[in-house]
């Protein structure tokens, strides 16, 4: 038999590890309505943002008793229960409670921006917890009292500081950099493991550092608010102090610098590698750092295109100590897709950026022309494929990247739709496209190497 404390601990762990809830409500006439939505949680309380005109909120106004299920589609760990719904107020007015919901569920932000919602807190009164993830135990029941919620404050899982630092760097976007290093290395036809690893560490460190510094300056300039997508949200959601994020950025730039110096030593103090490191530093460090800040001067697209193409060219040079345009050209299609990721973000944030007082190329073009520019970026990546093959920069196997074309056309169609929620996630879907495209390209280059060896 589990102790009361262990029961509460397991309840808290399940609650903290999930983010969707199915709520069933009933109005005074007995009409039942079930809805699934995102939730946030704190110390055992559940917070949801409900549509002002929805059946769920309407029912709660008449009858605050709710029934709920929290699960991930797996029968080994879930919560069923009863609760009392407390209406907090409009999502736009209650920052703390809104933050609790949003920090676990950033995809809900476009919805909250265009649909009037109300924050509701669900206070569990009686729950049934099924948790077979740590061995077989009978389903247990908790009837909550005031002391339980005090205890949950002590037991509730806390996010380790290191995880917040990782979140601040947005590591989920670094594959574009990893792919650039791999492609440049494969095109070179040579492979020195130590040089490759130092190049990878340096390039990834700069990318992560730029992400952290962009978060810092976007917040300071007022561009990143609760309703802004694209940031790591650690500053906006008050998980880390701005100064902590800036220091993290400086630390990562330091790692990149040490990697660059190690490469310079390995390459017998080659001057060209110093130039490449210097150009990369200028493009990366000043991408967000004011008073320059390429991204604030409508030069972000150019900086991103040059940076990722040069990562590929630099990776080629590190292996061969030879400058060759094919390493730069060989990553151009992917670089265009990466610019597409940035532009998708900037299309969504045009008005937020104007409000913050800085310019992007999307802001100059405006909402309508930005759609066509996005389409041009994406389609240009595919137009370049036969040209690169014809000039023997890519092998014939690389025609396989066209299997990602339906994904690209879907993204373009979404860019032209008025649905803000779909457009709000365009950068995310473009990143998925870039990953698919890069994977096929890398595989084709590996097949070409294998074919030559055989």
Image: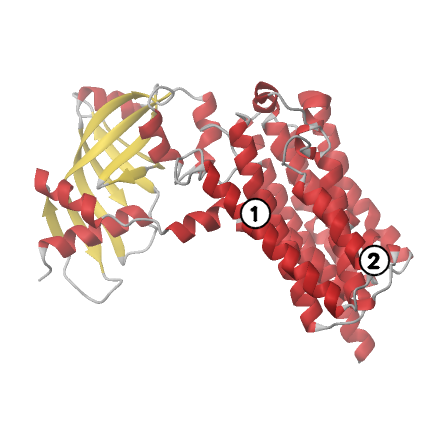
Snapshot quadrant of residue 358? top right
Snapshot quadrant of residue 81? top left
**Residue 173 picture location, percent across and down:** 58, 48
* Residue at the image point whose x is 83% and y is 63% from the top: 395
**Residue 328 picture location, percent across and down:** 82, 53
* Residue at the image point whose x is 24% and y is 65% from the top: 134
Q: Label 2: which residue?
A: 272
Asked if one can make out residue 99 in the rendered structure from this viewpoint, the answer is yes
Asked if one can make out residue 421 in the rendered structure from this viewpoint, the answer is no
Side (left or right) of 384 relative to 228: right
**Residue 336 picture location, percent across and down:** 74, 43
**Residue 236 picture location, percent across and down:** 44, 33
Q: Residue furthest right?
A: 391
Q: Label 1: which residue?
A: 250
* Residue at the image point whose x is 71% and y is 68% from the top: 195
The residue tagged with tag 1: helix, strand or loop? helix
Indicate the quadrant containing the C terminus: top left, top right, bottom left or bottom right.
bottom right
Q: Residue furthest bottom?
A: 454
Q: Which colour scheme appears in the figure?
A: secondary structure
Nearer the N terminus, badge 1 or badge 2?
A: 1
The residue tagged with tag 2: helix, strand or loop? helix
Judge by depth and name the residue closer to the eye, 42 or 284: 284
Q: On residue 396, which mark appears?
A: none
Q: Is residue 418 above or below residue 11?
A: above
Disc 2 crowd, CA 10 A, few/some/many (<14, 14-19, 20+): some
């Amino acid at each position: 038999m589990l102790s009361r404390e262990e029961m509460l601990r397991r309840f808290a762990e399940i609650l903290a590890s999930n983010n969707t809830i199915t709520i069933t409500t009933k109005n005074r006439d007995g009409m039942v309505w079930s809805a699934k939505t995102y939730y946030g949680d704190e110390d055992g309380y559940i917070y949801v943002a409900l549509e002002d005109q929805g059946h769920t909120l309407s029912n709660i106004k008449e009858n605050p008793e709710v029934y709920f299920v929290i699960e991930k589609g797996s029968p080994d760990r879930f919560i069923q229960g009863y609760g009392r719904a407390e209406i907090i107020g409009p999502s736009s007015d209650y920052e703390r409670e809104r933050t609790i919901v949003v920090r676990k569920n950033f995809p809900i932000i476009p919805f909250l921006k265009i649909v009037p919602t109300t924050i509701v807190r669900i206070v569990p009164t009686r729950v049934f917890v099924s948790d077979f993830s740590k061995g077989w135990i009978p389903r247990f029941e908790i009837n909550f009292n005031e002391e339980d919620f005090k205890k949950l404050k002590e037991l509730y899982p806390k996010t380790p500081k290191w995880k917040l630092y990782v979140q601040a760097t947005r590591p989920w976007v670094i594959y574009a950099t990893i792919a650039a290093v791999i492609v440049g290395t494969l095109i070179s036809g040579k492979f020195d493991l130590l040089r490759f690893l130092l190049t990878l560490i340096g390039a990834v460190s700069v990318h992560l550092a730029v992400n952290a510094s962009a978060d810092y300056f976007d917040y300071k300039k007022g561009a990143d608010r609760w309703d802004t997508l694209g940031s790591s949200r650690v500053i906006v959601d008050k998980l880390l102090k701005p100064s902590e994020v800036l220091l993290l950025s400086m630390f990562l730039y330091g790692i990149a610098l040490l990697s660059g110096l190690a490469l310079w030593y390995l390459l017998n103090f080659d001057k060209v590698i110093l130039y490449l490191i210097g150009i990369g530093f200028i493009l990366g460090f000043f991408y967000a750092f004011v008073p320059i800040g390429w991204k604030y001067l409508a030069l972000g697209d150019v900086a991103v295109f040059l940076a990722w193409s040069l990562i590929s060219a630099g990776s080629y040079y590190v292996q061969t100590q030879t400058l060759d345009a094919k390493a730069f050209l060989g990553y151009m299609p992917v670089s265009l897709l990466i610019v597409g990721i940035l532009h998708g973000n900037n299309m969504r944030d045009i008005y937020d950026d104007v409000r913050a007082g800085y310019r992007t190329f999307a802001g100059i073009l405006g909402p309508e022309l930005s759609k066509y520019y996005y389409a041009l970026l994406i389609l240009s990546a595919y137009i370049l494929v036969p040209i690169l093959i014809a000039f023997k920069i890519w092998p014939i196997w690389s025609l396989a990247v066209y299997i990602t074309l339906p994904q690209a056309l879907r993204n373009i169609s979404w860019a032209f739709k008025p649905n803000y929620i779909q457009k709000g996630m365009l950068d995310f879907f473009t990143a998925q496209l870039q990953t698919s495209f890069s994977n096929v390209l890398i595989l084709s280059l590996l097949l070409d190497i294998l074919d030559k060896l055989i």
